[in-house]
Amino acid sequence: MRELSLEHCRLDKRYDIRERLGRGSYAEIYLASDVVAAPNSPHSKVVVKALNVFLQDDLDNELERTLVENFQNEAIALDRVRHPNIISRLGHGTARDLAGYVFHYIVLEYLSGGDLQALVRKRPLSLSEVLGIVEQICAGLGHAHRQGVIHRDIKPQNLLLTSDHSTVKIADFGVARLGAYDSPVTRVGTNVYAPPEHSPAFATSREHEHGSVLSPASDIYSLAKTVYTLIAREAPRAFVNEPITSLPDAVFDEEWAESMLAVLRRSTLDDPKDRYQSTDDLWQALASVREQIEAEDESTVLRPRYEPPKAHPAIGYSPIVPEQPDFESVSETPAFKRQIDLPRRPVQAAPPAQRFPAMDRPNAPVATSGPAAIARTRKSSRFLRKLAAFGLFATLFAGVLYGTAAYIRNSGLVPWILSPFATRTGVANTDIYLRPDPSTDNDPIGLVTRNSKVRIVNSQNNWYQVDVVQQGRQRAGGPQASRGWLNGKYIDLDDK
């Protein structure tokens, strides 16, 4: 087993790796700062999930390809089910750590509120809070099911919270299944929350009775066991691979307990066909419980009995999906093949003052050590100091010239003449919607993707009316207008 050397490094010239949050059987999780994002952005901190195939002691080519394929499927599943109550993928890439080993990674949003398991350990939740959480999970999970994705590992530890604990997001789609529901499934999931049809303990004892099929009812089973944990503040260990048939005495004294128990019992029946078949069905079954709460709380806004669960978006959510990854096996990358041909030499540790050294791209040479390397480093340092001094002088000189020109132009001493035949162009620096007029108080009419080439046809204050010359990437669906207004901060003008 070999761990990646990533801490206190800059990944892809953008992500400063702060600390490792955890490690699984095939991936390592890191907290990072996005130096490109604004400090007050909700995505100034992100999670980097790095695939490390070398965590497997008995790694072979077939296992490696499977791990890479599963890692890519996780990214594809997250993009397919993008929703306000599902964790969002922000990016991806391939790099090498400080020891020169190639790895793939995906970038996820960071939810600083922790998970539901930690929350119920800190304090009890009121039934209103539990129902609010369940509604958000039902909204996100139902959306995933409609997109043909089954999560297969719903549990409190995979349900994350924003910093204010107002929004819940489903995380960890590492074992999610895409495609047909009736295909065989691998035994996965935490035993306490896993349904019989793919629970490790029931792999042989009941498979012949119910079959090993995949359906939304499997996730509903796990969600019901999770609801039990939120109410009782303890995992349903007394009902491992069994239906929930009772609630703790402290809970059962509540007026709503009998209605809640009936819902949880049906949700955890052994046969998937006997359970609720969708999250909408589960949410509607909780209507009697919701009505009791609403009757006790005069401030509660009454809602229709059969209203579907509503999503709860948090600040920073965007429905725009990033570019899809296309990972390949690490051993098949050119960098890996060059790496195994080079002599194995220890990588020198970075000096204490040098924090966040930039990690190599896969096609960069492997670092070496020794007297020759030290001599090259000293020579390179002298050259870089001279280059930096020259660059500083050139920058100051250019700044003086620019300031003088700007003063003369703005003072009116010399008329500023633009060629009537000049055409201003630019490039979109992010995905942004086109607007019918220079304002955001309207509906979008089109989408400009990142790196799209645009032509300026008009301007007003800090808004530009543009024609889209060439899209940065093609997208299907949505508004398709190619002319509209954009705020100037989203365009990098070519004449600047």
Image (tube, helix red, strand yellow):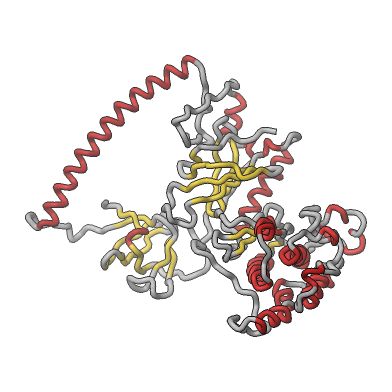
Q: Residue at x 72, y 60 (%)?
A: 154
**Residue situated in front as seen by the camera: 293 or 102:** 293
Q: Residue at x 27, y 34 (%)?
A: 391
**Residue situated in front as seen by the camera: 261 or 275:** 261
Instruction: Farthest residue to the top: give it.
Output: 371
Question: At which x and y percent is residue 396?
Answer: 22, 39
Question: At which x and y percent is residue 312?
Answer: 57, 69
Vertical order, 107 against 345 (above or below):
below
32 vs 168, left or right, is left
Question: At which x and y percent is residue 483?
Answer: 36, 68
Vertical order, 344 against 273 (above or below):
above
Vertical order, 243 against 205 (above or below):
below
Question: At which x and y percent is residue 281?
Answer: 73, 76
Q: Residue at x 43, y 68 (%)?
A: 446
8 vs 209, left or right, is left
Hey, which quadrant is residue 304 in on the image?
A: bottom right
Instruction: Farthest residue to the left: give it.
Output: 413
Hey, which quadrant is residue 166 in on the image?
A: bottom right
Q: Residue at x 37, y 24 (%)?
A: 381
Number of marks present in the image shown? 0
**Residue situated in front as seen by the camera: 13 or 267:** 267
239 vs 343, left or right, is right
Work out which quarter of the rendered image holds the N terminus and state it.
Answer: top right
Residue 181 visible in the snapshot: no
Residue 442 visible in the snapshot: yes
Hey, which quadrant is residue 258 in on the image?
A: bottom right
